Image (spheres, rainbow, N blue to C red):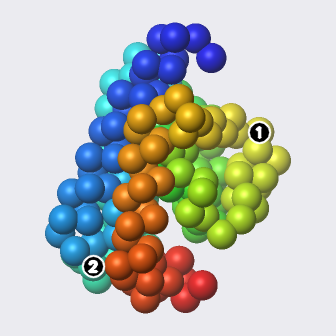
Amino acid sequence: MTDTATERHEELMRRAYDLALKSYHEGGCPIGGVLADRKTGEVLGEGHNMLVQEGNPVMHGEMAALRNAGRMENRYHTVLYTTLQPCFMCAGTIAQFGIPQVVIGDTVNAGSDETVVFLRSRGIDVVILDPESSRAAQDCIALAEKFRAEKPELWAEDWGGL
């Protein structure tokens, strides 16, 4: 990965993290997403998990970013940044819309690597930020870990009762 790509990933994951933190401060699940143009880095849509705020179990951070981006002919030129490894619902949506790249801040707090394997099997470039070198990844991991400890029942509800 080039320094420019690394810097862009760090910047846009920081933006997703800020959205996750906003959700956390609202009493919601701290998961944020940003949909950006893959070449320019322009933000096309962003959002955070809305389970608590809207009472909506399918409005995960990734879904909120896609909703905010709105209609477009296709998403073949985009990259999706997510603070937490996508669940199967979100991974399926990423595959369905042909989003070619996903950048993940936290895989530590996910139950398994199944969705990463699924995305890669569909030809999607999955970039997992390294917590050894990415401050944004460190923050994503710490926030999800804190939330899981504070509200395990809400964490389980968001992940379908797992």
Residue wearing tag 1: 123
Residue wearing tag 2: 52
Q: Label 2 sits on what residue type?
A: Val
Please tell me whether residue 135 is drawn above or below residue 107 in the rendered image: above
Instruction: Name, please, the residue furthest toward the left.
Output: 26
Q: Is residue 43 visible?
A: yes
Q: Label 1 sits on what residue type?
A: Gly
Query: Relative to residue 21, is residue 96 drawn left or right?
Result: right
Name the one closer to the observer, 146 or 120.
146
Which image quarter holds the C terminus? bottom right
Q: Residue at x 43, y 19 (%)?
A: 7
Q: Which mark is residue 152?
A: none
Q: Residue 21 in the image: state x and y as whole percent.
A: 26, 56
Query: Relative to residue 38, is residue 31 drawn left or right?
Result: left
Q: Earlier in the sequence, mark 1 or mark 2?
A: 2
Q: Residue 104 in the image: state x and y as whole percent.
A: 54, 44
In whole angstroms, how far apart are the C-alphas of marks 1 and 2? Answer: 33 Å
Instruction: Name, please, the residue furthest toward the right.
Output: 121
Q: Residue 121 in the image: state x and y as whole percent.
A: 82, 47
Please tell me whether residue 160 is drawn above or below residue 23 in the rendered image: below
Quarter location, residue 150: bottom left
Quarter location, residue 124: top right
